[in-house]
Image (cartoon, rainbow, N blue to C red):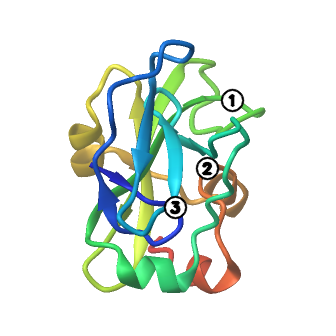
Amino acid sequence: MIECPKCLKECEGEAPREKRPYWLHCECECGFQFCYDENTSVYYDMDGKIISRTLTLEALKKMKPGIFARGLATDGPGDINMTNSGKQLRWVAVRGGMHDWTIYCHWSYNSEEWIRRQGDKVCNENHIRKLVQCSDDAFAMYRY
């Protein structure tokens, strides 16, 4: 199930397209059509343009607790600098039970669920906002 970037309801993705085999095509019940890149967790419109997904307080309140965003990043000054190893990190953004949220990360060989339970919390505001674009009111709900 994939969350619609327009109405935030979950919808099922169709079989991958031939040009971009890792993209899922979705048509939500609200009528909005989009593609979702399973490798990068990025949303695209039907013309291939990135759909901005800024996390707002309203969206945060509507979503269910659990992982709502994920991705890969390099451990270093150019991305998210946890130990400056240069290795690849996997991160997950998790919505908590009280409209709060946080980001956990760890080495990319660990599963998303393992990272959610045992990963390191991202505490640098610049890193947080780099991984999850968010409004100021949504950022105020970040759990350090």
Which of 23/55 is in front?
23
Q: Is residue 87 above or below residue 133?
A: above
Residue count near mark 1 (Cα–Cα under 10 Å), binned few <14, some 14–19, many ≥20: some
Q: How many marks?
A: 3
Q: Amino acid at mark 3?
A: Pro
User: Which one is nearer the viewer's eye here, 19 or 125?
Assistant: 19
Query: As drawn, is 125 to the left or to the right of 31?
Result: right
Q: Which mark is residue 93?
A: none
Q: Judging from the image, what secondary structure is the residue with disc 2 in?
A: helix
Mark 1 lies on residue = 76
Circle 2 packing at 10 Å, graded few (<14), some (14-19), many (20+), is: many
Q: Which residue is mark 2?
A: 131
Depth check: 58 or 134 in front?
Answer: 58
Tell me the kind of residue under disc 1. Answer: Gly
Q: On the image, which quarter does residue 96 sit in? A: bottom left
Q: Residue furthest front?
A: 31
Q: Nearer the viewer, mark 1 or mark 2?
A: 2
Image coords of residue 33 (percent x, y): 51, 51
In this orientation, does residue 105 appear?
A: yes
Q: Amino acid at mark 2?
A: Leu
Residue 4 x %, y % = 44, 60
Q: Tell me which residue sits at (42%, 70%) in the image.
A: 101
Q: Nearer the viewer, mark 3 or mark 1?
A: 3
The answer for how far apart the CA atoms under marks 1 and 2 are is 14 Å
Q: Residue 2: image x %, image y %?
A: 35, 50
Query: Which residue is denoted by mark 3 in the rendering?
Result: 5
